[in-house]
Image (spheres, rainbow, N blue to C red):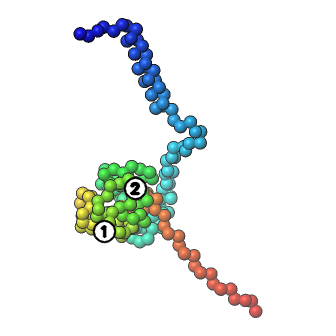
Amino acid sequence: MWKRLPPSWHTATLRRVAAAGLVFTLAACSGPSDESSAAPPQPAREKTDAERQALLASLPAPYSAGDLENGRRVFARCRSCHTIVEGGPNMTGPNLFGVFGRTAGAHPNFNYSNAVRQAGFAWDAEKLDQWLTRPRDFLPGNKMSFAGIPMPDERRDLIAYLKVETGYAPEPQAEPAAEPETPAP
């Protein structure tokens, strides 16, 4: 019923399989041959404590009085669902780097609820404060299961921390208008 194949057939077949495997392995390991391909992104430079404090001081009240260390501790509740570093991954929630000024529901590659996609506002400290108080009440129909942060000082510290750590840049202060020069008599 079954024919026994000659040993030379087995050897030839094994050589073909090994050669095909080698070709696929080499093809998978070789990158683009173009020397000008982009280098991998460099990690963002860590802010110094002095830079953090200067940015904190430049925030509008009440956030300029925030406690960054307490904000970091409060963010621990958020860390299981959100990242805050530039280029960080989306998790259960979107990456929050650059959240201030971003249109709600617009972070790329995140599957928002219809309620968030259709919210029609840009995130600022006041909207985020309302959201953090009770997300389900602020925007009914969103997917966030977080109950909220009821303590106003914890929300203030968290928002200050997020502003400092997520790439927020305060708006430049308008320069005072120059006084017109009066001609000398």
Q: Residue furthest right?
A: 185
Look at the image and tell me in which quarter the N terminus lies: top left
In the depicted structure, whether residue 1 falls above or below residue 128 = above
In the depicted structure, whether residue 40 falls above or below residue 50 = above
**Three-letter amino acid code at the position of disc 2:** Pro
Q: Is residue 179 left or right of residue 183?
A: left
Task: Locate residue 35: give its quadrant.
Answer: top right
In the depicted structure, whether residue 184 falls above or below residue 64 = below
Disc number at residue 108? 2
Q: Is residue 35 left or right of residue 10?
A: right
Q: Is residue 9 visible?
A: yes
Q: Is residue 149 visible?
A: no
x%, y% of residue 152? 30, 67
Look at the image and tell me in which quarter the C terminus lies: bottom right
The residue under label 1 is 130
Q: Nearer the viewer, mark 2 or mark 1?
A: 2
Q: Residues within 10 Å of mark 1 (few under 14, many from 20)?
A: some
Task: Locate residue 98: give its quadrant.
Answer: bottom left
